[in-house]
Amino acid sequence: MLKVSKLTKQFQSGDTKVHAVSNVSLEVPDGVFCAVLGKSGSGKSTLLSLLGALDKPSSGSIEVDGQDITKMGDRKLIRYRCDKIGFVFQNYNLIPNLTALENIMLPMEFAGVRGGERKKRAEKLLTQVGLTLDQQTRKPGRLSGGEQQRVAIARALANKPKLILADEPTGNLDSKTGQVIINLLRDLAQSEKTTIIAVTHDLGIARCAKIVLNLQDGRLVEGKK
């Protein structure tokens, strides 16, 4: 369960105080795919950074799996990001000189998972997201954009996170491939019992999401289930 209460992020721009996120409260259960919609400058990226503990709020709380991350020190936040959070980026952010399989194994190595177990889980995840055994041994440069995003999704799942944060996950994909990725995220949320939050301009994601949140000028203006 993700629970956000009265979350606010302010910063100073010259003489002006900007409310990037203002008094946002929301709840998203485990296993649910949630879309956050909004125009550029609406606060979507700031919200994602706060949820991922990449930035600290001015006030409010963020609870993931019963833990309030706003009260954690830097050392605990590093462990939180490793154990509880998976990230999916628009530009994939795969390591180019590693194979797809090795890209998935790397975060598990950082988490202290044993070698044999790392390889077994990586193979399972890549098969789950639809990559063949041949594709699993290729480096990112020999994979299509859609295939690279599948690898990125599998990597986000590597350490069995409670929350996956996806930043414009279909932004660099054609509409057909984007729809495949959207369906994959929705299905994985249910099968892995992982909360997935996707910030996007893509209305196709909203149509597939169980919960849709709309941000405008940093405020949550509408939500539906």
Image (spheres, rainbow, N blue to C red):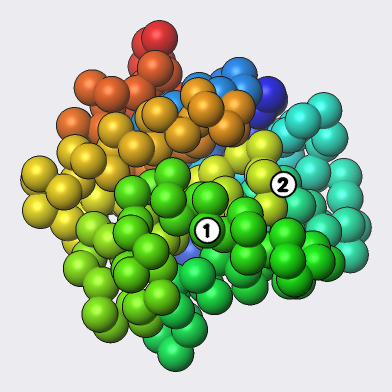
The picture places residue 29, in percent across and down from the top left corner, at 61, 19
Q: Residue furthest left?
A: 175
Q: Name the residue carrying label 1.
A: 123
Q: Residue at x 68, y 63 (%)?
A: 118
**Compared with residue 8, is residue 96 higher up or lower down, i.e. above or below?**
below
Q: 182 left or right of 20? A: left
Which SS class for mark 1? helix
**Compared with residue 208, is residue 121 higher up or lower down, i.e. above or below?**
below
Q: Are marks 2 and 1 in contact (CB under 8 Å)?
A: no
Q: Residue furthest bottom?
A: 97
Q: Nearer the viewer, residue 20 or 176?
A: 176
Query: Alpha carbon of mark 2 to alpha carbon of mark 1: how far?
Result: 21 Å
The image quadrant of residue 162 is top right
> For residue 84, which numbered disc appears in the image?
2
Q: Residue at x 63, y 73 (%)?
A: 106
Say few, some or many: other residues with alpha carbon within 10 Å of mark 1 (under 14 / 14 to 19 / 20 or more). Answer: many
Q: Residue at x 55, y 65 (%)?
A: 104
Q: Amino acid at mark 1?
A: Glu
Q: Is residue 48 visible?
A: no
The image quadrant of residue 88 is bottom left
Q: Amino acid at mark 2?
A: Lys
